[in-house]
Amino acid sequence: MTLSVAPFDQRQLRDVLGTFVTGVTVVTTRDARGVAHGVTANSFSSVSLDPPLVLWSQALTSRSFEAFRDSRHFAVNILAHDQVALSGHFAKSREDKFNGVEHHDGHGGAPVLAGAAAHLECEQVAAYPSGDHLIYIGRVLRIGHANRRPLAFAGGRYMLAHSWDLEASYLQFEQAPALPPQALRNVVAALPELAASLGEHSLCLAAWGNRGPVALHWEASRQPVSEHLVSGLVMPVTRSATGQAFAAFLPEAWTTPFIEEELRQFAEPGQDLDARREQFRAALDEVRRRGLARELGPAPARLHKTAVNTFSAPIRDTNGDMIMALTLAGSPARLGADWEGEVPRRLLAAAAELSRQLGHPAAGSAALPR
């Protein structure tokens, strides 16, 4: 591809600038009359740590330009991944933008929005005209951090940001065990009879994808665990039996980036991440020892909208590599939590038999449970 150095118009310049990925902020202030103002902006940037300075810029034609120009304080609200609607709300020109928006007053009365990934409360120390914008410099007085994933923006679209090590694992997807189409067809064909033999629980067949475990097929049986069985669903690695099975039996180089990302994402405030990491490693040791993963759900699961217990066992290929997970889900009333229960043992035997049929020699020759 040849890069053009010819004269450009504003649209072309906007397109080029749009390739730079930014966060999304809502900058707020309160004018001398006590009226709150807020605008969506992705022009925010850090300037200095000592002293702590940040900047953002505003169009001279903005409806709230005079309010921000004349105010001595502003707050920068860094939006979280689930606040796209809030970004759109403050991007529009309207009266009383804060009606129905949860917030509290920060320094100087500048509104701090609830649910933001982070915020900075600032004192305006300088303003510099620059073309059709005014650049504001603010000294940071107070900050807040909610440990939430931030929202990103590029090319006119909202995006989600992932850490580089997680992205690197996506690029290494070709190293994952191959899943031959015929092997998938053979296993799917066996699921209806297998579901019946296991007590009419719901079965899920999953594979390792470029974003973690992916549900390829659900066999709902005559007594499905719920009506929300979605093929193509990406499951969490640390909070699902399917994910834990893959984490236990796939190479650590493929699974560790996902595990680390989830441990950070789902960490409770004040939780010791190292302790949580060791706890999960101990859980994986248990999975390897038993050859089976388990996740108990006394509370309603987000997917199924009801409490669910799940067990998951590996299906291996001729090389002994795990290429699929066979997961069984049922209500706690019908599927107990016992590792040594009849249904989990039969699930483990069924996965071993499917592995044998796919050519895994160490799987034995036991028949599928009847």
Image (tube, grey):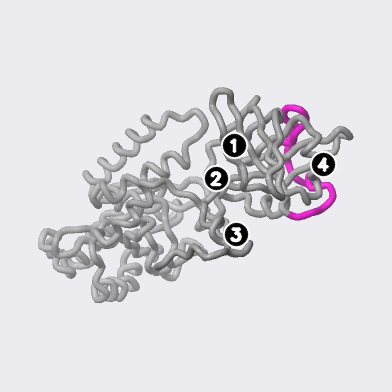
Marks 1/2: CA–CA distance: 8 Å
- Which residue is rendered at x = 81% and y = 49% of the image? 63
Marks 3/2: CA–CA distance: 23 Å
Residue 106 part of the magenta segment: yes
- The numbered dot on residue 66 is 4
Furthest residue in direction front, as rendered: 6
Residue 293 percent coordinates (x, y): 31, 49
* Label 1 sits on residue: 118
Marks 3/4: CA–CA distance: 25 Å
Furthest residue in direction right, as rendered: 33
- Which residue is rendered at x = 80% and y = 45% of the image? 64
Dot 4: within a 10 Å radius of its alpha carbon, few (fewer than 14), some, or many (20 or more) residues? few
Q: Nearer the viewer, mark 3 or mark 1?
A: 3
Marks 2/4: CA–CA distance: 29 Å
User: Going from the N terminus, do you reach mark 3 or mark 4 first?
Assistant: 3
Dot 1 lies on which element? Answer: strand
Q: Is residue 99 left or right of residue 293?
A: right
User: Going from the N terminus, do you reach mark 3 or mark 2 first?
Assistant: 3
User: Going from the N terminus, do you reach mark 3 or mark 1 first?
Assistant: 3
* Label 2 sits on residue: 150
Span of residues in magenta: 92-112
Dominant secondary structure (helix, strand or loop) of the stretch shown in magenta: loop
Dot 1: within a 10 Å radius of its alpha carbon, few (fewer than 14), some, or many (20 or more) residues? many
Q: Nearer the viewer, mark 2 or mark 4?
A: 4
* Label 3 sits on residue: 14
